[in-house]
Amino acid sequence: MRRSARKRTLARRAALVALAASALALAGCSSGSRPTARSLALQRADLIDVYRTLTGIEPAVRSEVAATKRAWPDVVDGLPAHVSARARSAITAAAERARAFALPALFSERASAALTGPASGLAGEVRSFAQLATRGWKLIVAAIEQIEHGSPPAARFARANVALYIECVYDAHFTLAQIGKQMRKGWEKLEGAPAFGSSLTLAQINQLADVYSEPDFRLYPHTGVKLGS
């Protein structure tokens, strides 16, 4: 009986190993296959939706970036011992503008999960920008409050960690500045002009790439403050 049970166990294990090997083989075969025409059509439709959404939010994005650029010189090298009224006003305005930015429904975590191809990554980048910018500026404002009015331990903690919050703001806009390049790469990956025709032209792609670009949206210079300084 024991020998028979052991044989059955070994047989089941062998069957499982064979099944796993078959699954891996099938996965290997499918990983190199070309997407179907239906899949490509869906990816192109999603990219067109993302393009239209990016175009629609451009004024709000520019407004947030403008407010951030006005405040950036006041935080790029860390917070001074005393934040002037002018700097506080610029920092508060940037925080308010970031908080006011409304992430389009298409770029929400739930909706973007249904996007296919390059559109999915682009939605994630816009969402990252919105989250990092909002959190970064919010925490910078909170750090200023702690430094000026908090207990000595709270003030020391805020000053020691403010570099992280400043870096969040920088990373948010660095991400934003890559979207134009990623849109062009996605368009080209999906076979460009011959496939999209007049629904999404090279001129439209170039125009968007000029807007969501490093010259327009990246922050200069890079942060000059280190964690704990």
Image (cartoon, rainbow, N blue to C red):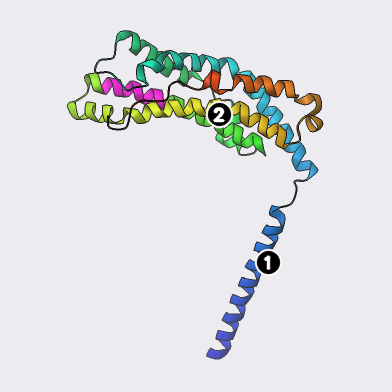
Q: Quadrant of the C terminus?
A: top left
Q: Decide: few, some or many residues near mark 1? Use Cα within 10 Å; few <14, some 14-19, many ≥20.
A: few
C-alpha span from label 1 to label 2: 40 Å
Which residue sits furthest left?
152
Q: Of 12 and 210, which appears nearest the observer? A: 210
Q: Predominant secondary structure in magenta?
A: helix
Give whichever of 154, 165 is nearer the camera.
Answer: 165
Instruction: Looking at the image, tell me whether mark 1 or mark 2 is earlier in sequence order.
Output: 1
Q: Residue drawn at (35%, 23%), measured in percent from left and top? A: 140
Q: Which mark is residue 22?
A: 1
Q: Is residue 178 magenta?
A: no
Residue 47 lies in what quarter of the image?
top right
Vertical arrangement, residue 148 with respect to residue 26, above or below:
above
In the rendering, at what x and y percent does residue 221 appear?
A: 43, 21
Which quadrant is home to the N terminus? bottom right
* Residue span colored magenta: 135-146
Residue 228 placement, left or right of 8? left
Q: In the drawing, does residue 207 fall left or right of residue 126?
A: right
For the residues bearing labels 1 and 2, Cβ distance under 8 angstroms: no
Is residue 116 in view? no
Label total for image: 2
Which amino acid is tagged 2? Answer: Val
Q: Is residue 142 visible?
A: yes
Residue type pointed to by label 1: Ser
Residue at numbered disc 2: 126
Which residue occupies 34% across, 28% down? 163
